[in-house]
Amino acid sequence: MLTTTPTPAGTLPAPTPADDDPQAPPVVVGADGSDCGLRAVRWAAEEAARRGAPLLIVHAMPHLGRRGVAGSAATDLPRARGATAQAYTVARHTAPSVPTSTEVAPGEPVGALLRAAEDSQLVVLGINTTGAADEMVLASVAQRVAARSPRPVVVVPRSRPGTAGSRPQVAVLGLGERVDDEPVATFAAEQARRMGRPLLVLHTQDDGAGDWAAESPAWAERYPDLRVTHAPVPGVTGGRVLAAACPTPLMALSAGHGGLLHRPLDGLHRWLLRHCTSPMVFVPPVHRVTGTEPREEIIALG
């Protein structure tokens, strides 16, 4: 069920692409009516403006289409429409020029967001964890979407005291397979240029021969207009990564490959998701984008 919300009266219409310039894929954001969800909507609207992309607000409704008592509409439908309307208002106030639409999607949140991700360029989700183990239940949607999405997934934590100020964006290399470092480095560099920020590259493994992402001179050749610094993180742990990276406007890392026992993310990734107070983007591994996902990972993800 798709609801496209028109531009409010009295505002200038959003710019539209030329006939020979098809509209860019949207930035997708999950909206659940929570404060964390609205914070993610703000972040996504700003990012859509930076990318010149439309914004699609998605609210999943598992019982959409089922009837209530005496054939009445499902009781969750008014709440779903209220959540998307509130998110739409926040997005329009944040980035008035961004074409914005809303969708109340049938099914569970993970499936609805993964379907939307297929035709998007980025997925944005809010998360409310503060480090307590029991709060990882609230992170299950973010974990499973990040572990299966073919597009990068940005996880925006709830608002905390302090800001990133002029701190650089961060790329963390070496947390997945070596081949997965290049997509992380590329995403982080392009994002830093979009936001007008310097970039800090954290190396958690020894440099690999022939890997441009691990070689400092190669960065200057590819991104001559970007200020890049490099730093090692020996004996990598979640605490050491956060100490070196945060606070930051955005920390980019590989989504990893999950594990057995149906764990959607690697242990270090789950720890960072629980404790990090800065936005993180999980960049999908190369095999997930190319459709060559190993069978063991498919089993692990369920």
Image (spheres, rainbow, N blue to C red):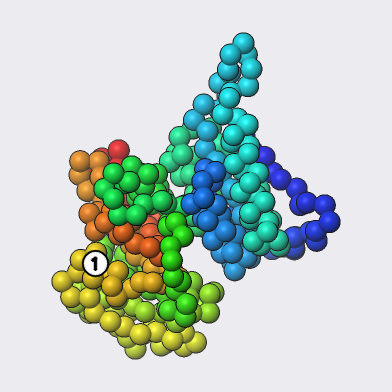
The answer to which quarter of the image holds residue 234 is: bottom left
The vertical placement of 103 against 234, above or below, is above
Residue 179 in picture, x, y percent from top left: 29, 66
- Tell me, yes or no, if residue 77 can be seen here: yes
Q: In this view, does 251 lie to the left or right of 296?
A: right
Q: Quadrant of the C terminus?
A: top left
Question: Residue at point 52% right, 56% down?
Answer: 39
Q: Which amino acid does label 1 sit on?
A: Gly
Residue 258 in picture, x, y percent from top left: 26, 50
Residue 29 in picture, x, y percent from top left: 53, 51
Q: Quadrant of the N terminus?
A: top right
Check the image and name the residue furthest to the top: 70
Q: In this view, does 74 lie to the left or right of 229?
A: right
Which of the pair 152/232 is nearer the observer? Answer: 232
- Tell me, yes or no, if residue 103 can be seen here: no
Which of the pair 156/255 is nearer the observer? Answer: 156
- Give the residue number, with chain letter if any, for mark 1: 239
Question: Residue at point 41% right, 51% down?
Answer: 128
